[in-house]
Amino acid sequence: MPRLALVVDDSRAIRVHMKDRLLALGFDEVAEASNAEEAWRCFDERDPDVVFLDMVLPDLSGAVFAKEVLEAAPRTRIVLVSALARDSNEVTAAISAGVRDFLRKPIDDAELARVVERLKTSM
């Protein structure tokens, strides 16, 4: 089971909700970042196992951030979190670049649990 998750979303409410659920689903620790700059700082300090990444960040596209993370740390599992449809061009491009999974907003707790279960089996 992954030990450290990072939730990157500019919405504090979404970060808090996901953090609570991820801890309940077995993560040892969940870090939070509201933008790409904070997320990179977390990577430098903590090296998270899994990143739950909003597609729309205030300082960088989630797709661009995902690509940069996967180039720098290819073992990192990334789950996109977005209100965009799974078949949108941005989401499709990010998945093609190596993103592991996708969660649609608003976040359904049962779907989040299924995503975490898939992460467990792929690690």
Image (cartoon, rainbow, N blue to C red):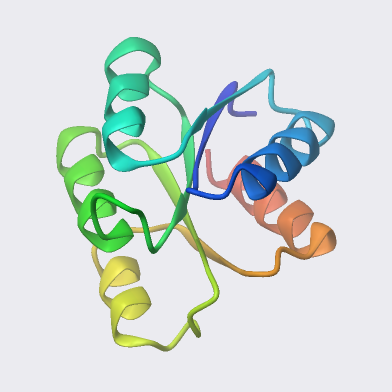
Residue at figure coordinates x 25%, y 39% from the top left: 74
Residue at figure coordinates x 69%, y 27% from the top left: 27
Q: Is residue 87 above or below residue 110?
A: below
Q: Is residue 96 above or below residue 58?
A: below
Image coordinates for residue 37, horizontal then vertical, percent: 26, 33
Q: In the shown orientation, is residue 106 left or right of residue 90?
A: right
Q: Nearer the viewer, residue 98 or 87?
A: 87
Residue at figure coordinates x 26%, y 60% from the top left: 61
Looking at the rendered structure, the number of numbered marks drawn on it comes to 0
Q: In the shown orientation, is residue 103 left or right of residue 44?
A: right
Image coordinates for residue 17, horizontal then vertical, percent: 75, 44
Image coordinates for residue 7, horizontal then vertical, percent: 53, 39
Q: Nearer the viewer, residue 50 or 42?
A: 42
Which of the image's four quarters has the N terminus?
top right
Image coordinates for residue 71, horizontal then vertical, percent: 15, 43
Residue at figure coordinates x 30%, y 67% from the top left: 94
Q: Is residue 10 above or below residue 49?
A: below
Task: Determine which quarter of the picture holds residue 104.
Answer: bottom right
Q: Nearer the viewer, residue 15 or 71?
A: 15
Q: In the shown orientation, is residue 48 left or right of residue 39?
A: right
Task: Determine which quarter of the picture holds residue 15.
Answer: top right
Q: Nearer the viewer, residue 41 or 46?
A: 41
In this view, the residue farthest toward the top is: 45
Q: In the shown orientation, is residue 26 left or right of residue 39?
A: right
Q: Is residue 42 above or below residue 85?
A: above
